[in-house]
Image (cartoon, rainbow, N blue to C red):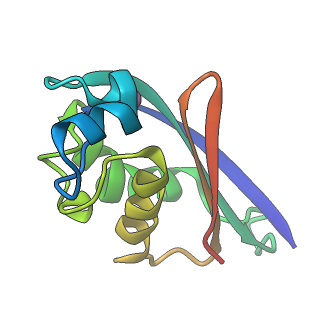
Amino acid sequence: MMTLTRRYRFAASHRLNTDALTPEQNARLYGKCNNPFGHGHDYVLDVTVEGAPGASGQIVQRETLDQCVSQQVLRHLDHRNLNCDVPELHGKVATTENLALAIEKMLKASWTLPAKLAHVRISETDRNAFLLETR
Ligand code: NI
């Protein structure tokens, strides 16, 4: 078994806030990430697929994977407000953990590739990254 990882980038804004808490509690819990009008990140998304190289000598065609990620994920996230524009995040706090779960859902909703989705890794800043096993 072998994996292929492709890297993608998108920019999006968010605000960490939950209606379950008071404004003061939100401010304490999320700090500056709770600032009322949000802030942006240049996210780095790594999508890893797993399989055996077929007759073509490839696990999947890069273009096929790129097209899938672009159609299912990037066009819905790039230059968007994660709190408002992404149905998969409605009712959830727009943390990068929840964003990783949303991206898994978006990819699996119409996954037609011959290789298995192995994991999704998303980095919000150069100091944090989240790895979601999706096998
Ligand atoms: Ni943030």
Residue at the image point whose x is 23% and y is 51% from the top: 21
Depth check: 6 or 43 in front?
43
Question: Residue 55 in the image: x percent, y percent?
Answer: 77, 74
Q: Which residue: 62% across, 21% down?
A: 126
| In-front residue for pair 12/74 | 12
Q: Is residue 93 left or right of residue 65?
A: left
Residue 1 seen in this snapshot: yes
Quadrant holding the C terminus: bottom right
The one of 17 and 122 positioned closer to us in this rendering: 17
Q: Where residue 54 sits in the image (x, y, percent)?
A: 76, 74
Q: Is residue 56 left or right of residue 89?
A: right
What is the quadrant of residue 59 in the picture? bottom right
Which residue is at the front of the view, 11 or 114? 11
Residue for point 28% across, 43% down: 77
- Please, which residue is most extreme toward the right here? 1
Is residue 107 depicted above or below 35 in this figure?
below
Position of residue 53 relative to residue 21, above or below, is: below
Where, quadrant-wise, is the N terminus in this rendering? bottom right
Residue 98: x %, y % from top left: 41, 56
Please, is residue 43 above or below residue 56 in the view?
Answer: above
